[in-house]
Amino acid sequence: MVEHPSPDTNAAELPAWLSRGLADLFPAASAPESLQDPDQALAARLAEAEQLGRPLRVKLGIDPTGSDIHLGHSILFRKLRAFQDAGHTAVLIIGDFTARIGDPTGKSATRVQLSAAEVEANAETYLLQLGLGQDPARSLLDFTTPGRLEVRRNSEWLAALDLPAVIELLGTSTVGQMLAKEDFAKRYGSGTPISLHEFLYPLLQGYDSVAIRADLELGGTDQKFNVAMGRDLQRHHKQRPQFALLLPILPGLDGVQKMSKSLGNTVGLADDPLSMYSKLEKVPDAVVNDYLTLLTDLELAALPASPRERQKAMALEVTRARHGLAAAQAAQADAATLVGGAAGAGAAEAEVPEASLAAVNFPAKAFYLLAAVGICASSSEARRAIQGGGVKLDGEKLVDANREFSGPDELQGLVLQLGKKTFRRLVP
RNA sequence: GGGUCGGUGCCCGAGUGGUUAAUGGGGGCGGACUGUAAAUCCGCUGGCUCUGCCUACGUUGGUUCAAAUCCAACCCGGCCCA
């Protein structure tokens, strides 16, 4: 490639771990030689950091509004981790204060406000899923290496703002600027209500950057407005404005809409190996390469061209990163046996999630059993599933929804199957 | 605050006194097909250990043998005016 004769040109290139999968970066990645300004060019800022031996402070904010982290979120954490591994400081902001307003981004309606207790409980779960107390080799973030991670809650500084401070904050932008934001513009245009407090959200998120003196903020492309707001506010507070690093929004399992719990197209970080693998190996062909780029470190060029092989390689690698190679390979093998037709014999061998019969009251009718064991959401749904011919017990189609089981003995050890990909081994 | 229009099942959206969990579409789930995919076709889509019983059309109360459908008050939202 290019020669690197001087430190100046060195800075003109970003490392691959940083540029992989980027959707947007501003103000600029690198700059012409005449403009090696560490405030304008990220490459220059990185070089400066190295020179001064001062790691960059890389901000990522999360609002603990739900309880499960899924792969869609994980692409941001993966990038944050890459910064950690390169020696920088990840500043993870738990939006315990902002979560109670609700980020209007991408929302077609005002979000429900959460109680402080709910938010705190969610925050705890998030940290555990991100790897708190775990071996960094297996977890998403590095919680153990000193100096690599700061976890901050934004109530720390936001709860302390008094009215004059809030008014000053509001004074930094205009209604026109707010309405320029796509979500607001859409909602305003379509007559969907926008509460005034929602205008505060971008300002508060921006203020977080001021509070922690961020050098760089990570976000999805939908965060562009909010991240840019951080730059404005930092300038307002006489700080060096942060760089913005935007990553694409991961499409969900449907391949069209973004991955989101409410759309039911997610793969959870906490999913067991088998369901993680089997969901992933059937993502639409069109998004397999996105998954590979954003969720793995694999070289795309080195992979087989066949879409089916790519799906498998991607599913295996993503599962491996969470559960280890052995578990991932087992999941791959099990997926092949379970779904591949020879369910009867295969199911007995394969490793499937277990479901306890403890909560079942016997005698139990088939439709009730499905619901009681948690495989169906309701007994009515179970009844329909059985009548629709989608339920198998130990490989044999269960046809009678009213079939009665007298006790756990005749069920334990058997595998209950709903559709092609939901399996439960019944245990006491 | 005034005027006006509106609030139906996961979502959109019919339905304006009388079988009926309530047309249709989307989404979801299941089946066939397939590459465990896409496309296509078919079925299901409130709850309950269910041949029946509950609960449902913003909330509460009322009229009626009978209401999602009529009346009243209230709550929430859009638009116009202030």
Image (cartoon, coloured by chain):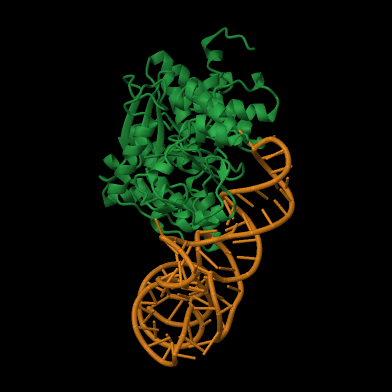
Residue depicted at 51% across the width and 32% down the height: A348
Total labels: the figure holds 0
Asked whether A413 or A189 is in front, the reply is A413
> Relative to A238, is B40 on the left or the right?
right
Residue depicted at 54% across the width and 54% down the height: A400
Task: Give how far across and how far down residue B53 sits, in percent.
Answer: 42, 72
> Relative to A159, is A312 on the left or the right?
right
- The tint of chain B in the picture is orange
Task: Give how far across and how far down residue A238 sits, in percent.
Answer: 37, 34
Determine if residue A165 is in view.
Answer: no
Quarter of the image holding residue A346? Answer: top right
Please determine whether, in this image, residue A198 is positioned above or below residue A425.
below
Residue depicted at 48% across the width and 46% down the height: A261
Residue depicted at 45% across the width and 59% down the height: A194
Asked whether A296 or B27 is in front, the reply is B27
> Relative to A48, is A19 on the left or the right?
right
Asked whether B38 or A404 is in front, the reply is A404
Task: Give how far across and how far down residue A360 sits, in percent.
Answer: 37, 49
- The tint of chain A in the picture is green
